[in-house]
Image (cartoon, rainbow, N blue to C red):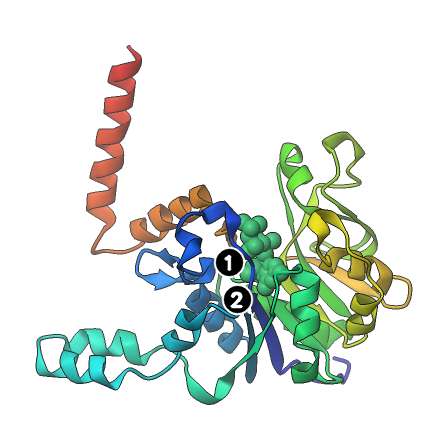
Amino acid sequence: MVNHRQITKAIIPAAGLGSRFLPVTKAVPKEMLPILDKPMLQFVIEEVIEAGIEEIILVVSPGKESISSYFRDNTELEKHLSSTDGHKLIELVKNIPTGDQVSYVVQEEPLGLGHAVLTAHAAIGDNPFAIVLPDDIITNTPGALRQMIDIYNAYGSGVIAVEAVPWESVDKYGVISGNRISDNLHQIESLVEKPAMDQAPSNLCIVGRYILPHTIFNDLRNTKTGAKNEIQLTDALSLALNTERILAYEFEGVRYDGGTPFGLLRASLEFGLARNDMKQDIIQLLGSLLSASSNSAT
Ligand code: UTP
């Protein structure tokens, strides 16, 4: 193992508009939408803590107070639960990581993921760091970020999580072209944002986990406004490839796309099927929905 600066800080950008979830995102940040009873944001916070990250920097927009209030103690609620029959529920509230580990920076305008990351520069300083997107939920033990930190520790280079997606979906993602180093690791040669299927160099698509050197901030500053009039992180990564080695890692785990209502529905169903208190009800529901739809088709 090579000795490198440890990854102790992670940026979680949560300042986007969440337009695919309108109208609910008029009032509720996308990152606070739940899979069953837990906000997406908490899933990624748990993954980040499991990976050994000590400092979490949440990038929020000016109107997202519900995010910071989620991480504050709520003594009134705890008092109420302990005086009623909610003793078990207290644990759920108390298990939310709070306080010292989480800090906030405000992105005044939603000028893109790249811009959100740049907003957190002062909090990161000259350290390599992680970026974790709260709308990509990945289940596995060890978590995807832990796996990536192990790769970083072994190779000392930036690491981006990639997933082989069906070819007909490549036009929704940033796609890498690279040289295979081992079964699940590639050295990235170039990146293409949302290519047409017949132009895509591979079906290995970038998903929301990154470990990057601090020099990416310079690349972000040199990145011009791109698609959707936003500063795109993928464009800055293309610049970074001129000077840095960046690896693409096919993580172990299942990814759920929490950026769309259907992705969140799929995650809710699958997570519910894994819970003893819901499994039977969900199977029954799915069974009756299936027979209702096949009856209406005949
Ligand atoms: P998305 O690309 O999914 O954008 O952002 P979005 O605004 O959240 O959603 P849509 O496309 O309008 O439906 C990926 C992550 O980057 C954050 C988002 O909060 C999300 O966690 N982000 C995006 C920012 O923090 N700031 C931005 O300006 C854009």
Give the mark nearest the N terminus, 1 or 2. 1
Q: How many marks?
A: 2
Q: Residue at x 77, y 56 (%)?
A: 225
Up-down: is 184 above or below 62? above
Q: Position of residue 95 (x, y in %)?
A: 33, 78
Q: Locate residue 203: give its quadrant.
A: top right
Q: Locate residue 171: give its quadrant.
A: top right
Q: What amino acid is at disc 2?
A: Gly
Q: Are marks 1 and 2 in contact (CB under 8 Å)?
A: yes
Q: Give the position of the N terminus as an image quadrant.
A: bottom right
Q: Which mark is residue 138?
A: 1
Closest to the observer: 71 or 127? 71
| Residue at image mark 2 | 143
Q: Residue at x 74, y 33 (%)?
A: 196
Q: Residue at x 35, y 63 (%)?
A: 38
Q: Locate residue 7: give its quadrant.
A: bottom right
Q: Position of residue 63 (x, y in %)?
A: 47, 68
